[in-house]
Amino acid sequence: MTADGVPGEMRSAAMTLLATLDDRQRSLAARPFTDDAARRWLEYRPAQRPGACIAEMSGAARKAAHRLLATGLSDHAYAQAMAAIALEEVLDRRERWLWGRHSGDYWVSVFGDPVGGDPWSWRFEGHHLSVTMTLAGGEISPAPVFLGANPACVSHAGRPVSRPLAPEEDLARALIDALGPAGRDLAVVAGQAPGDIRSQQLGRLHLCAADDCTNVHIDLSKNRSRRFCSTSCANRTNVAAYRTRRATRPTPS
Ligand SMILES: [Zn+2]
């Protein structure tokens, strides 16, 4: 551990990561702290998101990203997180490789400058894993950590081979059992779990459609048709498309 404890570990791990990424990935990973839309993007579903993608990183950069993740998690939670990532490959097989799920489809972002004294934060996120830590004035504020496991259990001959979230699941079931029938009637509010997503707001967060832009925007348009973060990105893309069309138009003879 460094002299200033976990905040120092996070700072040095984030600096190592940014130094190890190539220029393109660094431009995707390093974002201003004021980029609220990207910074508040908390999502555990499998989709592209702001940041540098693990799949596109060198071995050294991938290691640096994993070390940054480890600064925010205990030994056992880090094991659960890495198991959740590995399960992407198992799930893909179970789904007959239909979706091309990939254990490299995880994204890392660093918001603000880890070096100065201003607030900064980092996030490691992808399917079934969301870890965000914000640092300000020597304090660390974690956003709620999301961990999921799918398949929750892989077994063979009646014995579990992989069951990363067993402690949480078993404790929850033990709690329900301990309540007794009367307590259980009060505690269980529905026979079926509700759907995963209760808020539609996250579905409105999009990456800008401009090729050279990595901004995130919230689409509040009625027909959900907003593609660009700004009119300048829209104009730049439309002008480029117009020039391409004109250049490829057959010359009149
Ligand atoms: Zn843009």
Image: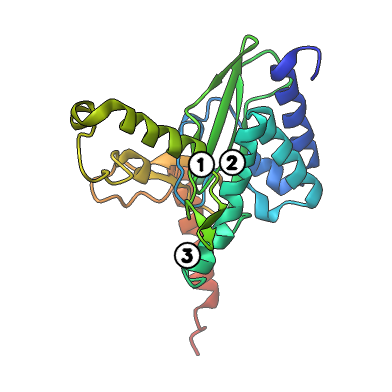
Mark sitting on residue 29: none
Q: Where residue 112 appears, x then y in whole percent? A: 63, 25
Q: Are marks 1 and 2 in contact (CB under 8 Å)?
A: yes
Query: Is disc 2 placed on a helix, strand or loop?
Result: helix
**Vertical placement of residue 195 versus 112, above or below:** below
Spatial CA span between label 1 and label 3: 52 Å
Query: Is disc 3 placed on a helix, strand or loop?
Result: helix
The outermost residue toward the top is 137
What amino acid does circle 2 point to?
Gln
What amino acid does circle 1 point to?
Leu
**Vertical placement of residue 183 versus 212, above or below:** above
Residue name at image x 53 percent, y 48 percent:
163
Residue 14 in view (yes/no): yes
Spatial CA span between label 3 and label 2: 50 Å
Residue 106 in view (yes/no): no
In this figure, which residue is indicated by the disc labeled 2?
Answer: 80
Report the front residue among 2 and 218: 2
Report the front residue among 247 and 127: 127
Compare marks 1 and 2 and give the one earlier in the sequence: 2
Compare marks 3 and 2 and give the one earlier in the sequence: 2
In this figure, which residue is indicated by the disc labeled 1?
Answer: 165
Q: Marks 1 and 3: which is nearer the front?
A: 1
